[in-house]
Image: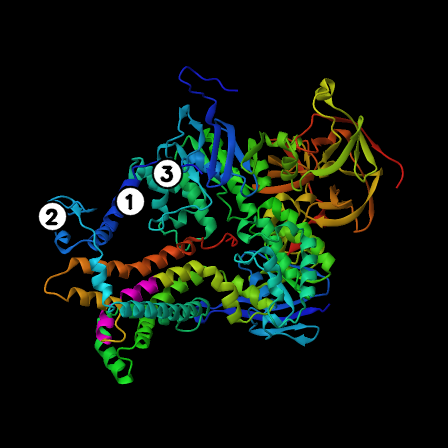
Amino acid sequence: MKRRAFTWATLPAILVAVMMLSPVLWMLLTSFKLPPDTVAMPPRFLPGDMAPENSFWFRGTLGNYRHVFGDGDSVGPILNSLWVAFWATLVSLLTGSMAGYALSRFAFRGVHFVQWLILGTRLLPPLAVAVPVSFLFSRVGLQDTRFGLILLYSALNLSLSTWMMKGFFDEVPRAFEEAAFIDGYTRLEAFFKVVLPQVIPGLTATSVLGFLGAWNEYAFALTLTSIDAVTLPVRVHAISADSSSVTWGPLAAAALVSILPPVLFTFFTRRYLLRGITLGTVKE
Amino acid sequence: MPTWKLSGVGKAFGRGNGRVEALRDIDLTVADHELLIILGPAGSGKSTLLRLLAGLEFADTGTLSRDEEDMTRLPPDRRDIAMVFQNFAVYPHLTVKENLVFPLRHGRGGISSQDIEKRVITAVEMLGIGDLLDRHPGTLSGGELQRVAIGRSLVRRPSLFLFDEPLINLDAKLREGLRSELHRIQRETRTAMVYATHDQAEAMALADKLAILDRGRLLQIGGPEMIYARPADSRVARLLGMPPINLFSLEQAKALGLPLGDGSFAGLRPEFLSVVADREGSATLSAIERLGHAEVLVLEAAGQILRAYVQGHSGLNPGERVKLTVEPQNLLWFKR
Amino acid sequence: MTIADGNGFEPEVAARLEGVAKTFGKTLALAPLDLEIRRGEFLTVLGPSGCGKSTLMRLLAGLEFPDIGSLWQGGKDVTRLSADHRDVALVFQLFTLYPHLTVLDNVTFPLRARGMAASEAEGLALHWLRFFEVDHFSRLKPKGLSQGDRQKIAMARALVRQAGLFLFDEPFSALDPGTRESLWERVRMELAARGATAILVTHDQTEAMALGDRLAVMRRGQLQQCDTPAKVYERPANVFVADFVGRPGMNLLSARKFGEWVQVDELAMRMRVSEGVAGLLKQGREMDHCLVGIRPEWVVIADGGVPLPVEHVAALGPANLLELRLGNGLVRSWLPSGVKKNRGESVPIQWMASACRFFDGETGELLSWKALEVECLPGN
């Protein structure tokens, strides 16, 4: 394979990439700095032990990480977040797929209405229902439980899952299931054996977005959790609110840890995201 | 092997103003061993007819029966049929071999593993796809994919094959090659087959029995040569034959000096129009299409364009004046 | 044969490809290709899917650039020129009509883009829409129009312009053969009147043979033969062309050469051949396995011939095609009208020496051998 020739068009792309990644880079460096270095001007971006005044060097330290995770208070939230995000993604993926499939395949009266209704829920600012949900949760005993969060996040993500998966199912020709019916498979069997494998990129994309949504969610987590079910975003904020001034170092460390799982998840599933949508067998 | 029968079948889609009658009053029989071709232009209802036979749709009126057994409302898996779709429907996530085994594995069939193996081998041999077994459909060409799709229907050993324009997405040469293979397969398996197409050459070449479908109605059913020689009306006449039949209204026929008959339209097959060079002739040869083994002569006479079909070489040149002769018994007259 | 003047401008040549090749990822779409397109000619490019014909068009249009080789148009090197700078008009299968413009605006678009006044452009556009009988759609937007009508409009859009090269990639694919035929007749006349150069890509070889001044046959990225349709039909360069061109293709029978006789496998028929110039020079290897090619129209039913069983009679309307079984394959012959044969019947066939073509058993290339006589052997 020959090397792609350089064109001037790649410059803006590089520029955008640099712009997007520089905050992350800043976070990475800051998480290893001591408090004075974090706010020093000009910014110090070279790690090392030579730290004469007013230079670009800073002393690397793991103190921030120890501060955040050392006392063990942050381990719980990390595990909570992982647990909740995992289950919420799975549930909304499964139910969303089935709903999306139904909307794609079944032409019942009012199907368009249902579709737009589902989409409409996304127009609602989640905060608008914060109070009723909180009330409901405490009445039913779901306040400060991981199960409650899972339920809520699944519901919040469902509209997105359904819409995305419906789009992917629309791309799968009906002939695939019909051939299976003729062979003797039930619709459910056909769904799992024949249709679902065709939308793996869709499932991956939907689960990545679902995971991100659940992982990053802050507002409801803040309202609905207090001790047991505290998730990472809440904990990170708590850390920064800990002292009178902003402690950039520990904040950066906590933030860096919180972006790690989604990044890893997306990185390891990237091959499934890119796999061709129709693998060339459908001639339209 | 059973005989399938459709009686008075009708099917409509949509409601109110959007209601479309896809099929009306269909009476059709497919006998054991028969290759029935449904020929019709796009939108004539061919697919709907096939899907009704398959059980993917159910008729609004009429009955579908197999050897007297009523199958009108039976779901597809209980009908003992196999279908090959236009877009192949070969599963991309399975290898070719897995695709061939898939129809037999649904758990309710009760077919033993040895039996499955045997059937797959027979199908593979019949279609010559032995070296494709471990490949994935994404790497196969159109012709190969179509063979796999046919293979999948073969392993089921059904009592009826349904083919919905299976060759339409292949290019011309490949179509012809697969066509004769299909014919051979149908004969070797001795199973009834219903095949839908809009390509009249394909229909003529393959059919034992031909059914002409237009806008949901069956216009004529019979052997291809019979329909070609004695079409029921001008629409049917126009659908079969390349180059298409020369059609004239009463006035046009009179203008050409044709012997008149009983009907409002006259039809003349191009092979029955004799053309000879004649400087006093009333017609001019405007163009010649050389097909290799034959020629199509495009003629102008009395302000109309006619086509004649001549085997071999006519020895004529464009621009020449010619004389046209017609034997009265070769003129077809239609009411419509 | 081209005559170039001092500036390299060759009046006879509209476009030229020299050693042009193109790869997409790991697939070789076009192997190094040399092709000359003469001014005023209508060249048809024929081949199965994946043969590279669409890639060829895109290279000529400037939508893709060759990996190696150079492209010349009107005497200038246009290899690196993008489509908007080339003097080409395109009508591709996936005709792109702008959905937000009316039909009329769509057709005037290329003219207005080049600075023509609105009234003049509209007049020209309407003329061409009328030519294709779609002028009553002028004020409508393309949405809702049938594929066939859209293709006609796309063609009108191409013809409003004067262009050095017209490129058509199966532009009438959505229309039935009858309409296509009549449309091409008229478009050809128009192009000829303008002295315009055009290239048509198709997989329908009846169309390719009927329309082209010259026919280029392609397969798997390689040019097989480029010549007038008659020559391609009469003397195909290899077995692929022999089989591909012609409906149905040439009968290709496996045969063996013994001395100066070529004996067809499993058939009691042999031909005495002279190897021509190659034989005189006795170059190359001794060939024993070869293929004998005879077009179906040259296989005749004759009483003294060799009998073969009828496998199938395809009723193709005006004429019937007889398919006879020979070993594992078929021999095809055109039945004279009125003659009826049934499956299983034995039909004696024969052919003339002049009808035979010989192809190398290994490479499939056409050999310069000539059959001098045909002999039917006695026996079963």
Say what amino acid the circle numbered 1 marks: Ala
Which labelled disc corresponds to residue A41? Answer: 2
Say what amino acid the circle numbered 3 marks: Leu
Q: Position of residue A173 (x, y in %)?
A: 49, 60
Q: Residues at marks 2 and 1, common chain?
A: yes
Which labelled disc corresponds to residue B243? Answer: none
Query: Horizontal placement of A276 versus B69: left or right?
Result: left
Magenta highlight on residue A217? yes
Q: Residues at marks 2 and 3, common chain?
A: no
Say what amino acid the circle numbered 2 marks: Met
State the extent of the magenta-drawn residues as a range.
A209-225
Q: Is residue C120 visible?
A: no
Which labelled disc corresponds to residue C124? Answer: 3
Q: Position of residue A88 (x, y in %)?
A: 35, 70
Residue at the image point whose x is 72% and y is 46% from the top: C320
User: Considering only vertical position in the picture, is C169 above or below B103?
Assistant: above
User: Which is more toward the observer, A253 or B175?
Assistant: A253
Q: Earlier in the sequence, mark 2 or mark 1?
A: 1
Element type at mark 1: helix
Element type at mark 2: loop
Q: Position of residue B237 (x, y in %)?
A: 63, 53
For label 1, the residue is A13
User: Which is more toward the observer, B104 or B179?
Assistant: B104
Work out how far the residue at label 3 is from the one at label 1, CA to CA, in angstroms: 44 Å
Query: Horizontal placement of C174 versus B4: left or right?
Result: left
Q: Nearer the viewer, mark 2 or mark 3?
A: 2
Q: Is residue B304 visible?
A: yes
- Where, quadrant-wise, is the N terminus of chain A in this rendering? top left
